[in-house]
Image: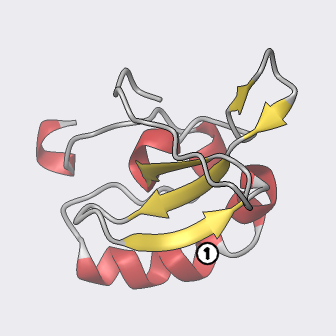
Amino acid sequence: PRGSRIAIRYHEDNPPALAVRMQEMFGEATNPTIAQGRVPLVLELLSPAQRPLQITRDLSAFWKGAYREVQKEMKGRYPKHVWPDDPANTAPTRRTKKYS
């Protein structure tokens, strides 16, 4: 996402996962896939400080549901970062509001 080169983590007992900053997933409606679209990646959505915020297998459902709670908390903790009301239709970013 957003041109970043992020390694996919493969686990013996779990599906492949991708740890990515939440802001870089803005504008995406579904989880990225591998194996010609057959295997969706589990997303570990990270805060701007690279700390895990949420793990999801269904990005669309996350944007429509649990994102609201994460958004409220993160707006207070990271006010310089973008926390849109409609993340599925917002351009992804790696920058703060000042540089957007």
Vertical side of 4 occupied by 87: above or below: below
Q: Residue at the location (34% across, 37% down)?
A: 93
Q: Quadrant of residue 67?
A: bottom right
Vertical side of 5 occupied by 26: above or below: below
Q: Residue at the location (53% across, 60% down)?
A: 44
Q: Residue at the location (61% across, 75% down)?
A: 68
Q: 68 or 56: which is nearer to us?
A: 56
Left or right: 37, with 29 as reference point: right
- State the image coordinates of residue 55 (x, y, percent, origin top left): 61, 67
For the C terminus, give its image quadrant.
Answer: top left
Q: 17 or 22: which is nearer to us?
A: 17
Residue 86 appears in view: no
Q: Quadrant of residue 88?
A: top right
Residue at the left extreme of this rendering: 98
| Residue corresponding to mark 1 | 68
Residue 57 appears in view: yes
Q: Residue at the location (53% across, 39% down)?
A: 90
Q: What's the image's color scheme?
A: secondary structure
- State the image coordinates of residue 31 (x, y, percent, origin top left): 71, 41
Q: Residues within 10 Å of mark 1 (few under 14, many from 20)?
A: some
Q: Identify which amino acid the numbered label 1 is placed on.
A: Arg
Total residue callouts: 1
Residue at the top extreme of this rendering: 36
Q: 18 or 84: which is nearer to us?
A: 18
Which SS class for mark 1?
helix
- State the image coordinates of residue 57 (x, y, percent, origin top left): 76, 57
Residue at the front extreme of this rendering: 12
- State the image coordinates of residue 23 (x, y, percent, origin top left): 41, 48
Q: 16 or 90: which is nearer to us?
A: 16
